[in-house]
Image (cartoon, rainbow, N blue to C red):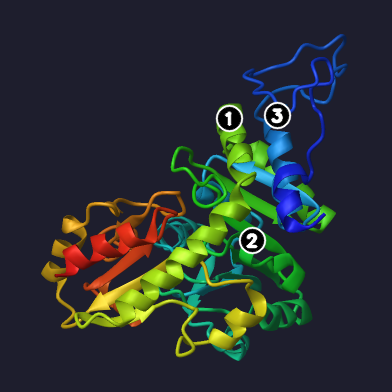
Amino acid sequence: MKFNTKVIHGGQENIDPAYGSVMPPIYQTSTYSQSTPGGHKGFEYSRSGNPTRSALERAFASIENGNYGLAFSSGLAAIDAVIKLLEPGDEVISINDLYGGSYRLFKQVFEKYGIKFHFIGMENAETVENYITPNTKLIWTETPTNPMLNIIDIEAIGKIAKAKNILFAVDNTFATPYLQQPLNLGADIVMHSATKYLGGHSDVVMGALVVNDKDLADRLYFIQNASGAVCGPQDSFLVLRGIKTLHVRMQRHCENGRAIAEFLQAHPKIEKVFWPGFETHPNHEIAKKQMNDFGGMLSFSTKGNNYEQAIKIVEKLKVFTLAESLGGVESLAGHPASMTHASIPKEEREKTGVLDSLIRLSVGIEDIDDLISDLKQALD
């Protein structure tokens, strides 16, 4: 199937043959009857498996061109499961420009259990090799990164990881499988905060993992069941529904994102716009190579690096909503230094460009004239 067909039909089957339901039913149950101990129809207890969640997990695998999908109660729960593949003494090479919640999980939770993290810039893939030791077991990256929209060469890092027998995981939340499919480029694990574009309507919290290797999948399924951070059937149904319009939503996100980026770049009060579609953006050529378009996420900073000015701008927005999160049909604005990345120390934030003046936009699918007018009145 082509991608636009996969989002609607990929991995799906009629799981309710009794009634011919076109959409997977919501199996709102915690347990399942058995004719004899172990005599069941594939499901025993909904932490271990639920038909609605299983339908979603097949859909996750399909749209990422993978073999196995796993659904979790949040994106951080999905990341948590990946790090639980490791043991005390193992080392992780992580992108330094990453979501603040990922940084908090790595530094404040897993470092206490003897796992060492190296946070580095990965814009030049060869830099990764300088940090590899015999204890390196995982490379973790985002591309585009949050919130600086840095582009990482997935194929190049995948080759390094494979040569050293190191797991390579890519957070594909910003791009979505509509724009890039990291498993095709050499990643071992793809992670999503399905809360964002996959759900698409800001009404559910969920995480996803997709892999190709059966042994790796089995280890992750074990962790998923043992730790229990699973999503419920209602949430599974909502994300299944969201995925079916991913392709048409992403097309508009990309169109509007481009228009907003070009408007901001020409505005006299703007110092810098971070958007992979600009030819001057670092690794723009890699973005062109590994992505189908440049997405609806961008960040910008105002002249003077003024914290108060940035706060005034986001407070004055009317169509854009000041809120955490991203990837919904509605446009959202955020101030990373005080919101999504507040858990990262100021000196570490500023090393990656997350200044006090930085504003991040998740450009929605509203009429572009209304979005530009809203930004104009807030800036002026």
Q: CA distance from mark 1 to mark 3?
A: 17 Å
- Disc number placed over residue 110 in the picture, else none: none
Residue 32 figure quarter:
top right
Evaluate whether residue 147 shows in this view.
no
Left or right for 230, reference 330: right
Closer mark to the observer between disc 2 and disc 1: 2
Nearer to the camera, 291 or 64: 291
As drawn, 93 above or below 371: below
Which element type, helix, strand or loop, lies under badge 3?
loop
Q: At 54% across and 86% down in the image, what residue appears?
A: 283
Closer mark to the observer between disc 1 and disc 3: 3
What residue sits right under mark 3 in the picture?
23
Residue 84 lies, in percent from the top left, at 61, 53
As drawn, 86 above or below 38: below
What residue sits right under mark 1 in the picture?
232
Residue 340 lies, in percent from the top left, at 34, 58
Which element type, helix, strand or loop, lies under badge 2?
helix
Q: Looking at the image, is mark 2 or mark 3 earlier in the sequence?
A: 3
What residue sits right under mark 2 in the picture?
178
Q: Looking at the image, is mark 1 or mark 3 earlier in the sequence?
A: 3
The amino acid on which the numbered mark 2 sits, given as a three-letter code, is Tyr
Nearer to the camera, 53 or 35: 53
Q: Circle 3: is it few (<14), some (14-19), or many (20+) Cα within 10 Å?
A: some
Residue 113 lies, in percent from the top left, at 51, 57
Quadrant showing the C terminus: bottom left
Q: CA distance from mark 2 to mark 3?
A: 22 Å
The amino acid on which the numbered mark 3 sits, given as a three-letter code, is Met
